[in-house]
Image (cartoon, grey):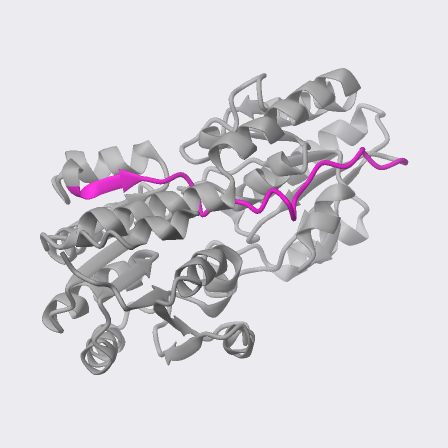
Amino acid sequence: MATIKSIILVVNADWYFWAHRLALAQALRNTGIEVVVAAAIERNYDHTIRQAGFRFIPLKLQRRSVNFLTEMRSLLELRHIYHEEQPDIVHHFTIKPVIYGSLAARAARIPFIVNTIPGLGYTFLANTQKRRVIRRAVLIAYRAALMSKNLRVIFQNPDDQSLFVQKNVIPSYRTKVIRSSGVDTNLFHPVPEPHGPPIVLLASRLLWDKGIQEFVDAARLVKESGLICRFVLIGIPDIKNPNSVPEESLRQWHDAGLVEWWGFHNDMPKVLQQSTIVTLPSYYPEGVPRILLEAAATGRTIVTTDTPGCREVVQHNVTGLLVPPRQSSPLAEAILIALKDPQLRERLGSAARTRVEQEFEESYVIAQTIAVYRNLTGDQAFPLLAN
């Protein structure tokens, strides 16, 4: 049995840690464990993370780089950090930290390795010849990185877990499904729908495969029906992603009055309270989209696609409405049905809130993560973290 005194949480970007893993870090720290955060600086959250009381190690990791020398430097950088820090556990999040970090941790003889794969990403979406070759290479890299016996992998949905097990990337007994990073149900809480024209909201990284074009087309169809409503996009283009929506397109839609582009917002509880319907017509290989959990916690009606990750949150006609991916007409039809039926919205929103409280509350998800640490390390102090 090991006694765990220190852990490094490694993520691809500083903003990702702040948005998705801050609560986990705080829970670990509250038990006296030293928590170090390592991430690439993309949105200057390094200062905010330090102000929250965490030691921060900046990484040179580049999310979209495919340059061999750059990638090797990232791997060696992580190996150097692990050799110097000698943590008891390293926990990696997202593709490059998982692959490079696991290899580096094994080389640095770190006792325990935990990885979270929050969705498979763009590589597992496109079906071109080039992408198929890249996908095979990525799976080979995953297989090499995840071969340690002192390692566990957390997936956010069973579809992703099944793929890795079926492809012999990792045996099932070393995997665990923990759906999402959870949501703070005190911060996101139900409020009555606002007065005035209803708002249909999409908040996301502005990537085409998040269903942005389908959302815009659905907005046109709904407005052509004569129903008065507003369609709002929240977010900014991800310039490091090849599938990013150009800012020029966003401004054209906004100026034409088709959709309103509100840009980036920090105060998502306030934004969601202004909405009537929250939609995410994604066909991106999601883990579990956080925005859907936040919308459900706020008691809002959700319209999303019947795809891995999204259907982890929404049960059709129970906690929301599911529509086929890549199709604007069914999306518009589902939005119209919900907009015209306040009783339906109340039923779906109430059921969504209840399900979030029972299955996705932040402390519950953290407790599941802690259980992975405990089972891997044998440290019986870890159950205290779930209290």
Q: How many marks?
A: 0
Q: Residue at point 39% right, 45% down? A: 367
Stretch in magenta: 174-196
Q: Is residue 190 above or below residue 107?
A: above
Q: Residue at point 54% right, 72% down? A: 52
Percent from the top left, x then y, of residue 266?
66, 60
Characterize the magenta stretch by its predominant secondary structure: loop
Q: Quadrant of residue 110?
A: bottom left
Percent from the top left, x then y, of residue 188?
65, 44
Does the stretch in magenta take in 366? no
Does the stretch in magenta take in 192? yes
Q: Is 13 positioned to the left or the right of 143 in the image? A: right
Percent from the top left, x then y, of residue 288?
45, 40
Judge whether residue 216 can be spotted in this image.
yes
Percent from the top left, x then y, of residue 62?
37, 71
Q: Is residue 157 above or below residue 236?
A: above
Q: Is 264 positioned to the left or the right of 43 in the image? A: right
Q: Quadrant of residue 132?
A: top left
Q: Quadrant of residue 245?
A: bottom right
In this rendered view, identify the residue nearer to me: 322 or 70. 322
In the rendered view of the protein, which quadrant contains the N terminus? Answer: bottom left
Q: Is 104 positioned to the left or the right of 36 in the image? A: left
Q: Is residue 355 above or below residue 58?
A: above
